[in-house]
Image: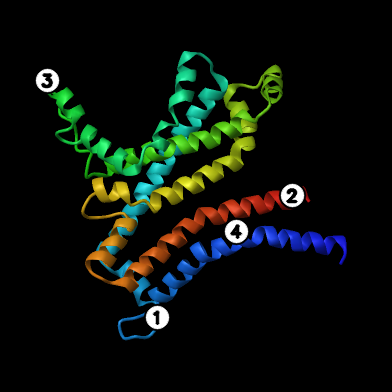
Amino acid sequence: MNKNTKQAILGLTLVGPAFLLLLVIVVLPIAQSFIASLQSESGGYDFSRYQALFTDIGMRANIVYTLKITIVSCALVLAISYAMALYLRFSSGRIVEWIRKTYMIPMFIPGVIATYGLMNLLGNHGWLARLLLPLGLELPRIIFDPKGLIIANLWFNIPFATMLLSSAIAGIPNSVIESAKDVGAGRLSIFFRFILPLSYKTFLVAFTFVFMGVIGSFTAPFLIGENAPQMLGVAMQQVFGVFGEREQASAIAFFTFLLCSVPGYFYIRSMAKEESART
């Protein structure tokens, strides 16, 4: 047995457990959901369950609502996180140190507790409404409204996205920035020509994780979301738990998986192009 064969066997042995775990936890449930979603009411197999996703008015509204919440949340999360990462990288002082020590705290608070905290803070009879009442100000409806869901998504996702983007921007050498300044490049020019290209890969990673986290979320949409339309995670639970339609719930689950696969596809494609360019 030559050296290359031994290395190949060793590599397969090392990745084997991870591959089996991925197969059992991810691949097989997805395949089972897809097969279940193809079962029609007559006992055969067709795409009637997926057709119902787009022909049923309520379900179509849920899909549009989910995509709107996801796109707006992702845009705000990434914009705020990128701004925070830039501020932490190129600024100094007590405020910067305070932000560095505290911005990760939301990641360690369970989602249920954080959601109930938002309800007590932003509800019609919450703390903020009571503080504004003596001033004659009325708090707009936030809880059981898209605004509440977006605020919850910001709370849950900004720390993680900021952590990823901060690590990428911190890895940009100071010599690159200083050289650009020496030749007269302005801040916008430095950002678009150096910082953004050098952190673009991490930006795609952050977008992918935020997109998947928001579109598949359940706790916040279930507790502070509207009754109709609903996020797809809540709609799937209602279809399965309330109406007992396992096949239709499986169709919603697989369709959600397909939506989550879209940013993943563009990320893998971008990385493949980068690798091919290197070779």
Horizontal placement of 150 versus 226: left or right? right
Quadrant in the picture for residue 91: top right
Between 225 and 277, the one lying in front of the other is 225
Q: Is residue 227 depicted above or below 132 in this figure?
A: below
Q: Is residue 206 depicted above or below 16 in this figure?
A: above
Circle count: 4
Query: Could you say where residue 193 lies in the image, as x and y percent from the top left?
Result: 64, 32
Residue at the spot of label 4: 18
User: Quick check: marks 2 and 4 in contact, CB under 8 Å?
Assistant: no
Q: Which mark is residue 277?
A: 2
Instruction: Looking at the image, tell me whether mark 3 or mark 4 is earlier in sequence order.
Output: 4
Question: Spatial distance from mark 1 to mark 2, Cα to Cα?
Answer: 42 Å
* Residue farthest toward the right in the current orientation of the protein: 2
Horizontal placement of 225 versus 250: left or right? left
Q: Mark 2 falls on what kind of element?
A: helix
Residue ID at (16%, 35%): 124
